[in-house]
Image (cartoon, rainbow, N blue to C red):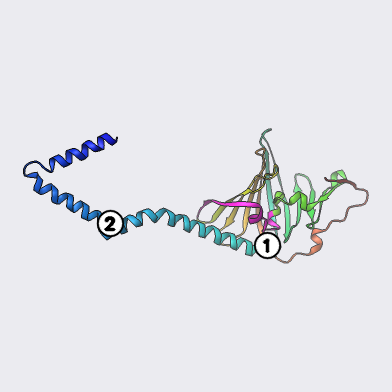
Amino acid sequence: MQQTNEKILINFSNKGTQGPEKRTLLPMKLRIIQSLCSPITWLLLGIFLFVSPLGATQADLLEEEILTAIEKKYTNNGFQADFSQISTLAALEITETASGKAWFNHPGKMKWLYLSPQRHEIVTNGQILWIYRPDQDQVMKGDAKKIFKAGAGGAVLSNIGLMRENFTIELKEKNDTHLFFLLTAKQENPDMVSLLIQVSRTTHEIGQVTTRNIYGDTTEFKFTNIQFKKMDPSIFEFKIPDGSSIIEMD
């Protein structure tokens, strides 16, 4: 390629020194050089070179604006919603669905009331976790901070500060109504590799959360009828029914 370019350059130079063409080609080369050196040319070149970085900066500003709005909306605020859930075990190609109601309060308080396919409850006051299965007269009890510390089980909705603390955040997709952020865990955790959240451009509400573990299993939560309001602290406490067997979770 270099030899070809040299031949073109030599041919151009030789033509410029032969016969009457010499007087016309030299001014033409001079005009080209002057054009390349003109301020307008460099201004246009500068605009061309900086178009892409400007676009990236605008995307960064949009991402930061939305994330700040999410934090403002969810920090120190409680909310309740209806939810539907789709869980997929990748290795076994098994998909299960469920639905119910959920309550959240900052920081770290949650209650998931599953109504379908079987009624059960998952409750935490931020310190203790209870999982109650009435059909089995069984309560599983454990340390909520250990279990939910990485943002698993939708815990990021009850403590929105976990987003920046535990995840790197990337604006993955956007349309006229929603933005989709990919949250990748900063520390290796087999139970929580990433979260994909869907955020409304107008209300800044998180309408969908999809979790993924190291095995490729996913759980998708969709939230509807979202209502932000003051929460009664008793919602996030649980009294173990008489006669229930208790299993301590490690």
Which amino acid, by three-letter code, is at mark 1? Answer: Gln
Q: Is residue 79 left or right of residue 67?
A: right
Badge 1 crowding class, 10 Å Cα cut-off, few under 14, some 14 to 19, many 20 or more, is: few
Badge 2 crowding class, 10 Å Cα cut-off, few under 14, some 14 to 19, many 20 or more, is: few
Where residue 52 appears, x then y in whole percent? 42, 53
Is residue 43 something one can see in this rendering? yes
Residue at image x 59%, y 63%? 69
Q: Is residue 9 magenta?
A: no
Residue 41, which numbered label?
2
Compare residues 127 and 219 and report the one nearer the observer. 127
Is residue 201 something one can see in this rendering? no
Where residue 216 appears, x then y in whole percent? 65, 38
The residue where tag 1 is placed is: 227
Q: Is residue 82 left or right of residue 63?
A: right
Asked if disc 1 and disc 2 are in contact, CB closer than 8 Å, the reply is no
Which amino acid, by three-letter code, is at mark 2? Answer: Thr
Image quadrant where one finds the N terminus: top left
Q: Is residue 173 magenta?
A: yes
Where residue 103 appears, x then y in whole percent? 73, 58
Using the image, determine if residue 7 lies above or below residue 141. Answer: above
Magenta stretch bounds = 156-175
